[in-house]
Amino acid sequence: MTVSGMTGRLAGILLWAAAGAAVPMSGAAETLGRALADAYENSGLLEQNRALLRAADEDVAQTVSRLRPIVDWSADVTHTASRRRAGTPVTIESHSTDLNLGLSASLLLYDFGATDLQIEAAKENVLATRQALVGVEQQVLLRAVEAFMNVRRTSEVVALRRNNLNLIREQLRAARDRFEVGEVTRTDVSQAEARLAAAQSGLAAAEGDLARAKEEFTAAVGRRPGGLVPPRRMPDIGGSVEDAKARAMQRHPDMRRARRDVTVAELNVRVAEAARRPTINLTGRIGAGEELGGSDFSRTGSIGIQATGPIYRGGRLSSLTRQAMARRDAARGSLHDTRLRIARNVGNAYASLRATRAGIEASREAVRAARVAFRGVREEANLGARTTLDVLDAEQELLNARADLISAEADLYIAAYAVLAATGQLTARDLNLDVQLYDAAAYYNLVKDAPLPSSEQGRKLDRVLRALGKQ
């Protein structure tokens, strides 16, 4: 085979490689939006944190119940035996079995606002937990973006390396043919064989990367990837870095949660202070007792107002107040740290995005230059000024440049969505995903008044719980 014919075949394979890299994976076309929607619907981490939010909702119901009457019943059967000596040798024995039944009730009349403060603290904790759920949602969606783009990246790199391997096999075959006719030395053949082994190793590594990327996609999205198509457009990330930082201070879930945590801590200080004050309760009791097998019986009833308050608790109440103050100060410090961390993350995300964009421009220029160089080396080889190995090296540089461009384009989308996450905008609602959005307030509205199981609201709540149990 002549050098001209061989380079022509190389050019054909190279064009096949360029076209093959743009072909999506087999299977139905799958968009990034569909992958994000499935990640939102299939995430066990989101389900876990939704359950934690429902548990926080129940804290409100439990605190509200303290303002309602508390009614208890009691029942006991007591057998009493006695034996006494009443002179010598007279001994008197007696036995009785008594049945006692009772109902007791109490109602908190006044506690100087302590319970109301606890209710407000529980409500603020619910709002903080909702923001924690939004933060988890952002983590889930960003992980899905990274998994999607990594499968895209690795699949295209595998296609490039497979085409490169075919090209090197063609080069090795040509080198052996030319060696048989004495046009090249054994060294040329050995170089081609070494390049073939390196290409096989590179393909195996790329296929391993693709397998790992698919496993990560399955974990992040909840199913195996199909034929992933590139996103049509970049997400809208807004204006300047300073605008993004200001936006993040207002809407990032970590920032909102930190503010709620400060409010909870401040309310808990007031709750600890209120624990020093008395409480006033309305109490009542009715009871009945009867001697089984006898004639004695009793009926009792009482109602009253009871006031209780601490006098001395060994310093415990003072310690609880100081502890609440320390936790309030810690929450304030956490809010300050969160503010700095979010501002830093926004700045870093924008810096990464700018760097990735610059890298793409450089990669495109590298692909252009490598393509021109390959064509030039190929023409020089036709004139006998270049060896086939020179052609192969130029082709390898072109494929490496294309692989770098593929990676840079994947990184660009990841960086853009990372900016959305840093500003608190990477949510199913903000992305307008085709999913049924989780209503964080629905369960709270059912339980906030601590409904009885026999009430209509209680029966509706039971239906909700049965539905949750079947998920």
Image: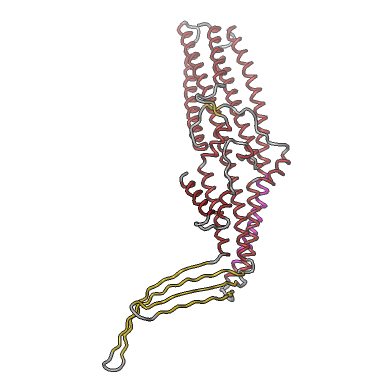
- 58 relative to 17, above or below: below
Q: Residue at x 57, y 26 (%)?
A: 229
- Give the colour scheme shown: secondary structure
For the image shown, how many numbered marks are present on the structure? 0
Name the main secondary structure of what is drawn in magenta: helix
Residue segment shown in magenta: 320-343
- Residue 346: in magenta span: no
Q: Residue at x 28, y 89 (%)?
A: 91
- 453 relative to 358, above or below: below
Give the x, y percent position of residue 304.
56, 76
Q: Residue at x 60, y 36 (%)?
A: 433
Give the x, y percent position of residue 315.
58, 72
- 331 relative to 468, above or below: below
- 346 relative to 10, above or below: below
Q: Residue at x 63, y 46 (%)?
A: 253
Q: Which quarter of the figure has residue 241?
A: top right
Foreground residue among 163 and 469: 469
Foreground residue among 353 and 453: 453
Foreground residue among 208 and 459: 459
